[in-house]
């Protein structure tokens, strides 16, 4: 399954043109966060966003914008993971 995921998602979707990788990673974070029940993937895509240059402030702004659509529990979970990975200094 992991091989298929890697080949499919990262070998196909992430290599397509049309969107900058930084924006594509941010959208992936939004999709996964919105689905719920994918906490380890949310964690991985927070880390991926930080590595690619989407900073803590941007991720907080995105989560805040999503609150009316995804609810407080998912939003608070994402913020909690963000605090673990990139604590406020």
Image: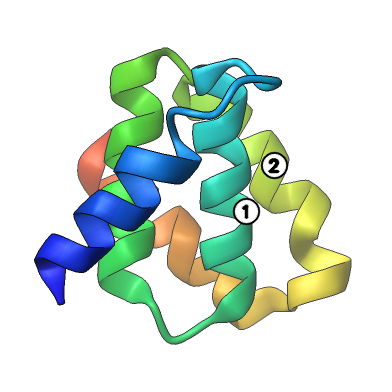
Quarter-wise, where is residue 69 in the image? bottom right
Question: Residue 16: x, y in percent?
Answer: 54, 29
Circle 1 packing at 10 Å, graded few (<14), some (14-19), many (20+), is: some
Q: Which residue is drawn at 25% across and 69% down?
A: 40
Residue 86 position (above or below residue 8): above
Residue 18 image-quadrant placement:
top right
**Residue assigned mark 1:** 30
Residue at 37%, 17% in the rendered image: 52
Quadrant containing the N terminus is bottom left
- Residue at mark 2 to residue at mark 1: CA–CA distance: 8 Å
Q: Residue furthest right?
A: 68
Q: Position of residue 37 (x, y in %)?
A: 43, 86
- The residue located at (52%, 65%) in the rendering is 32
The nearer-to-camera label among 2 and 1 is 1
Q: Can residue 32 be seen in this view?
A: yes
- The residue beneath circle 2 is 62
């Amino acid at each position: 399954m992991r091989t298929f995921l890697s080949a499919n998602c990262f070998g196909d979707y992430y290599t397509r043109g049309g969107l900058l990788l930084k924006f594509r990673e941010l959208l992936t974070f939004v999709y996964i966060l919105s689905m719920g029940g994918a906490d380890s993937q949310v964690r991985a895509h927070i880390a991926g966003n930080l590595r690619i240059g989407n900073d803590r402030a941007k991720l907080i702004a995105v989560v805040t914008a999503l609150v009316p659509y995804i609810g407080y529990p998912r939003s608070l979970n994402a913020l909690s993971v963000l605090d673990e990975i990139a604590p406020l200094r």
